[in-house]
Amino acid sequence: MHKFKKIFNKENGVVIGAVHFPPLLGFSEFPGFEIARENALKDLGAFERGGADAIIFENNYDIPHTEFVGPEIGASMLLLGAEIKKATTLPVGISVLWNDYETALSVAKVLDLQFIRVPVFIDTVKTSYGIIEGNFEEIIKFRKQIQAEHVALFTDIHVKHAEILSPHTITESAQLAIKEGSDGLIITGKWTGDAPDIAELKDVRDAVAHFPIICGSGVDSKNIHKLFEYASGGIVSTSLKEGVAKQGEVNVKGYEQRTEEEKVAELMASI
């Protein structure tokens, strides 16, 4: 059985709710672990009651990001991730931005999480934080080294917030990622809140047959039906948060804006 189906107990219509931590230890806006914990558990509760299938947590507001995080961020994510894991029976994953697969896999191994997100796996991209080269061989090697082969690798292709430097088309990147060990392809729009291009999504689906495809940005109750014609699931957060988008906010909404249960339920009903 493919890892995707084993984790979610279904092959299509999977909604993964993203819990975004506030700026963590070492950042000037760090609000303290108690507030970070309370916010995370509030968002988790909204996703659970609204009917989401799984949770992924990430250090979304640690800006500026670095390719690999320091020990203070790893420790913060382990501490807060343990609270999430303890509070839910849903499948749980982790993404450590910008591309820290070592920390993500280590936390996943320690907390017995089911999956991680790897923003750059096969491509080479230029970001605001420098050029990041996909290092699939090292990722697979490290996962084996820490005996975490059960942890699924959900990998972005042509990831958002980046300029693609690789020569591959998105379908070529998809096929390469599968060949080199991806357990699920993540396709995004160009920015937070932007949905994937439907034509690209269809092209990748045609190229990879039944392999899992996950929409990594821009999913909402209005477009989910169309996106899920081709995608197996989606990672969703921004469209489910309270309030309006903030001017000048890189992540579109601020870390103090909570996930709304009603919006999650509406999204699930739209599938």
Image: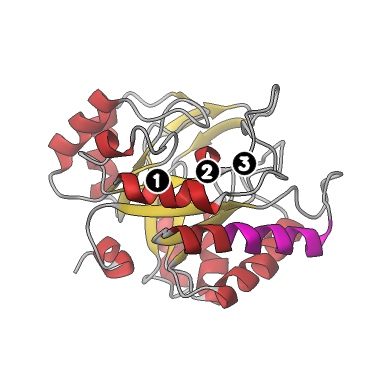
As for residue 141 lying within the magenta part, the answer is no
**In the displayed structure image, the side of residue 256 where residue 112 appears, left or right:** left
Residue 173: image x %, image y %? 29, 35
Instruction: Identify the residue shown where x is 76% and y is 53%.
Output: 24
For label 2, the residue is: 240
The quarter in which the N terminus is drawn is bottom left
For label 3, the residue is: 242
Instruction: Identify the residue shown where x is 27% and y is 38%.
Output: 225
Instruction: Identify the residue shown where x is 15% and y is 36%.
Output: 207
**Chain-order first, disc 1 or disc 3:** 3
- What distance separates the C-alpha of mark 1 from that of mark 2? 8 Å
**In the displayed structure image, the side of residue 93 where residue 75 appears, left or right:** right
Within-10-Å neighbours for mark 1: few <14, some 14–19, many 20+: many
Q: Which residues are magenta?
A: 32-44
Within-10-Å neighbours for mark 2: few <14, some 14–19, many 20+: many
**Chain-order first, disc 1 or disc 2:** 2
Q: Are marks 1 and 2 in contact (CB under 8 Å)?
A: yes
Q: Is residue 134 above or below residue 115?
A: above
Q: In the image, what residue type sits under mark 1?
A: Leu
* Camera-side residue of 142 and 100: 100
Say which mark, if any, is on residue 169. none
Q: Which quarter of the picture shows residue 169? A: top left
For label 1, the residue is: 267
Residue 82: image x %, image y %? 62, 73
